[in-house]
Amino acid sequence: MISPLSDTNPLLTIVTVFDVGQQGNSPSGRFLFLLNQEVMHVTDRNSVLEYRLSDDSFARGIRFTGYFATDSHNQLTLAEPFTDISIKLRHANDSEALLIKVSLQVIDIANPTVRGALDPQITNVPSPHV
């Protein structure tokens, strides 16, 4: 079964990031992260999920540097090599219902030694075709 959430039509979350110095929502308070949706929820097998920096975040010098996941059931793989503006993941959705936490790592190129992290959640309901 081919998922409607394919490489060309991913489930998209736009990530807006501000380097606010303090009082942000990152653990250190340095960065403020805003998402256009609370949770990515997967219902189809082999769905592609994309976290993409907003155009204004990228213009301000924010870049993705990587991602990490709490995925003990091997549901997530990179759909393609990540770039500094986009991280695409493939969710197999061939296991039980799960909550997967992802840590998206960012830097501000004006101060690249300071790394920020956003921890969005991914949930799923297994496809009836599992």
Image (spheres, rainbow, N blue to C red):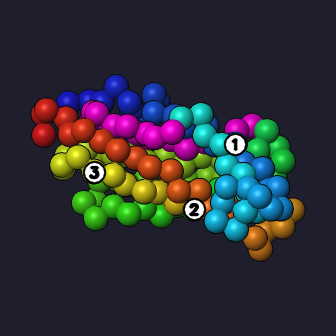
**The disc labelled 3 sits on which kind of residue?**
Leu
Examine the residues drawn in magenta and state their main secondary structure. Answer: strand
In this view, the residue in front, 26 or 60, is 26
Q: Pick whichever of labels 2 and 3 is earlier in the sequence.
A: 2
- Horizontal side of residue 21 vs 96, given as left or right: right
Q: Which mark is residue 102?
A: none
- Could you tell me which residue is drawn at 27 percent across and 33 percent down? 44
In this view, the residue in front, 119 or 68, is 119
Q: Residue furthest bottom?
A: 113
On the image, numbered disc 1 is attached to which residue? 16
On the image, numbered disc 2 is attached to which residue? 66
Q: Tell me: residue 7, above or below residue 92.
A: above
Q: In terms of secondary structure, where does tag 3 sit? A: loop
Cα separation, mark 2 vs mark 3, equals 22 Å
* Magenta stretch in the rendered image: 38-55
On the image, numbered disc 3 is attached to which residue? 98
In this view, the residue in front, 125 or 1, is 125
- Could you tell me which residue is drawn at 19 percent across and 35 percent down? 127
Disc 3 to disc 1: CB gap under 8 Å: no
- Could you tell me which residue is drawn at 59 percent across and 34 percent down? 36
Q: Tell me: residue 127, above or below residue 73.
A: above
Crowd band around label 3 with a 10 angstrom C-alpha radius: few (<14), some (14–19), many (20+): some
Cα separation, mark 3 vs mark 1, equals 26 Å
